[in-house]
Image: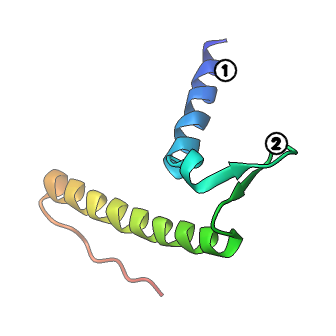
């Protein structure tokens, strides 16, 4: 039972991380589905920008932690 509650909490955290402004950005239709207020394409562009920003923030956080832990950051070749 405890594991189920942990999973529910995890899903809620992930959902609200990506949709913290659900009521501002979406409207619920008669069928009960949430639709973007500003259109699908606008919402997809917004989400893409948020993922890029999130990735940059995470990269900086990882670099900072590696510097604190090891005193240096190894360069990694990406090909």
SS at mark 2 in the image: loop
x 67%, y 75%: residue? 41
x 18%, y 51%: residue? 69
Farthest-out residue, bottom: 79
Farthest-out residue, top: 1
Where residue 32 appears, x then y in whole percent? 82, 42
Q: Is residue 47 above or below residue 32?
A: below
Farthest-out residue, front: 30
Nearer-the-camera pick, 52 or 22: 22
Say the numbered circle drawn on residue 15.
Answer: none
Nearer-the-camera pick, 17 or 20: 20
**Which numbered disc, 1 or 2, marks the residue closer to the eye?**
2
Residue wearing tag 2: 32
Residue wearing tag 1: 4
> Which quadrant holds the N terminus?
top right
- Judge the density around disc 1: few (<14), some (14-19), many (≥20) Cα neighbours within 10 Å: few
Where residue 2 appears, x then y in whole percent? 61, 13
x 25%, y 71%: residue? 74
Nearer-the-camera pick, 32 or 62: 32
SS at mark 1 in the image: helix
x 49%, y 66%: residue? 51
Q: Is residue 61 above or below residue 16?
A: below
* For residue 18, side relative to residue 70 (left or right): right
* For residue 72, side relative to residue 15 (left or right): left
């Amino acid at each position: 039972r405890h594991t189920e509650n942990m999973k529910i909490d995890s899903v809620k955290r992930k959902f609200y991380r990506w949709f913290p402004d659900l009521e501002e950005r979406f409207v619920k239709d008669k069928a009960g589905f949430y639709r973007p207020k500003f259109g699908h394409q606008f919402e997809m562009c917004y989400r893409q920008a948020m993922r890029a920003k999130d990735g940059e923030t995470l990269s900086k956080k990882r670099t900072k932690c590696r510097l604190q832990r090891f005193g240096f950051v190894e360069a990694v070749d990406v090909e």
